[in-house]
Image (spheres, coloured by chain):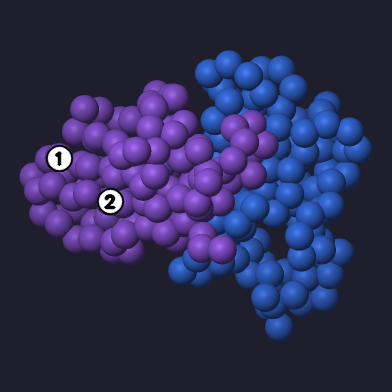
Amino acid sequence: EAGVTQFPSHSVIEKGQTVTLRCDPISGHDNLYWYRRVMGKEIKFLLHFVKESKQDESGMPNNRFLAERTGGTYSTLKVQPAELEDSGVYFCASSQGVNTGELFFGEGSRLTVL
Amino acid sequence: AQSVAQPEDQVNVAEGNPLTVKCTYSVSGNPYLFWYVQYPNRGLQFLLKYITGDNLVKGSYGFEAEFNKSQTSFHLKKPSALVSDSALYFCAVSAPSGSARQLTFGSGTQLTVLP
């Protein structure tokens, strides 16, 4: 069974540019989450999809971040325009149940904004 | 708001010795507690969780954790460390309902097991 896959693994862009990160969850997992780890600090929640609907987007830092989940399958996270403080590792995770807490994570997409 | 503290950025232990990675938490109501591990160039992997019941929880790879409600702690332990246990360990907490259902992670502890 394929795990959670994320693309790209690493992206280097300049301030003001746009980047789109993609996540393919485990097949059949309705719940999809985005998290971010900045500069070796804690991993912070960004948002949660149930199928194609945003269940909780309380962690999104500002309106430069846009997440979508087309047809309840893969998800994209767009940052436009990127700022220096957006640098970090963006993790995607998926699960079947919501409150089990047992999430399956991808390897992360490292974003470097110069 | 819920929070997790991992007071040690780095823990070094000799192979064969017992290891402890510390975690304390703050949450309203009864907590759900988790440990995840991240090996180099890999995603986070679930190790174990405490939801209810026995305070001592056993997980993957011989790890266990003890829930201590009075000290609000959930320390990760292993009786005999292996070099292959070297990795980044994250403690996480969530509440069973309401706006705090999402996982809140600590800042991580880098465990190095020395041969």
Q: Quadrant of residue A46?
A: top left
**Furthest-bottom residue in view?**
B115
User: Residue A17, percent across and down?
Assistant: 9, 48
Quick one: SS at disc 2? strand
Quick one: SS at disc 1? loop
- State whether residue B63 is above or below residue A99: below
Q: Between disc 2 and disc 1, whose residue precedes?
A: 2
Asked if badge 2 and badge 1 are on a common chain, one would say yes
In this structure image, what is the colour of chain A? purple
**Which class describes the residues within 10 Å of circle 1: few (<14), some (14-19), or many (20+)?**
some
Tag 1: residue type? Answer: Gln
Which numbered dot is residue A62?
none
Give the residue pinned by disc 1.
A80
Give the residue pinned by disc 2.
A21
User: Residue B77, percent across and down?
Assistant: 79, 56
Give the residue at x 16% y 44%: A82
User: Residue A49, percent across and down?
Assistant: 43, 33
